[in-house]
């Protein structure tokens, strides 16, 4: 099971997540898309793919901030969760993709296991964010399949 957690303020990360989810489903993976992630609704023995934009001065989007607060305040140990992060950001800001790093730090503090891969998407490039994310998916899937073999 791949849980896709979305943090989107203006819609670009949401659209990217939808395209990633569709691509994964077409490849035969079981996927659940969470537009307003809630810790209680996420499978703990699964892989979480966080797709978020960075908003304002490196902030998390409004729809994922309650999830981040929930994780920070919850005593749950997330050792059975592995995760990767895709972050959309604007490289003209010094807080480029900071929201993704914040989520990563938060999950690591709860003992979730990073897949040690991430994708920082600069929205100033010509390539569409969803195209960059889909092009990155083979890297994600190779790490996902490697994890399955090692279980």
Image (cartoon, rainbow, N blue to C red):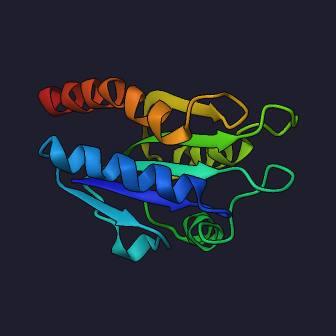
**Could one spot residue 79 in this view of the protein?**
no
In which quadrant will I find the C terminus?
A: top left
**In which quarter of the view is residue 139 placed?**
top left
Residue 35: give x, y in percent of width and height.
47, 69
- Identify which residue, 14 or 57, lies in the foreground: 14
Q: How many marks?
A: 0
Residue 132: give x, y in percent of width and height.
49, 31
Task: Note whether 34 is above or below 89 in the view shown.
Answer: below
Outermost residue, front side = 126
Task: Note whether 71 is above or below 51 in the view shown.
Answer: below
Residue plotted at (59% across, 66% down): 64
Residue plotted at (76% across, 55% down): 55
Residue plotted at (16% across, 33% down): 148
Q: Is 38 left, or right, of 151 in this rendering?
A: right
Q: Is 60 left, or right, of 115 in this rendering?
A: right
Residue 19: give x, y in percent of width and height.
38, 49
- Identify which residue, 49 or 16, lies in the foreground: 16
Residue plotted at (28% across, 51% down): 22
């Amino acid at each position: 099971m791949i849980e896709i957690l979305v943090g989107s303020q203006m819609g670009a990360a949401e659209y990217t997540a939808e395209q990633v989810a569709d691509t994964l489903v077409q490849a035969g993976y079981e996927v659940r898309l969470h537009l307003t992630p809630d810790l209680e609704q996420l499978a703990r023995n699964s892989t979480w793919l966080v797709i978020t934009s960075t908003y304002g001065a490196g902030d998390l989007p409004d729809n994922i901030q309650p999830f981040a607060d929930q994780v920070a305040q919850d005593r749950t140990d997330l050792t059975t969760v592995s995760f990767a992060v895709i972050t959309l950001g604007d490289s003209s800001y010094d807080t480029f993709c900071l929201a993704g790093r914040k989520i990563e730090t938060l999950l690591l503090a709860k003992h979730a296991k990073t897949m040690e891969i991430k994708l920082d998407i600069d929205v100033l490039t010509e390539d569409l964010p969803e195209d960059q994310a889909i092009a990155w998916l083979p890297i994600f899937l190779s790490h996902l399949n490697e994890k399955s073999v090692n279980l």
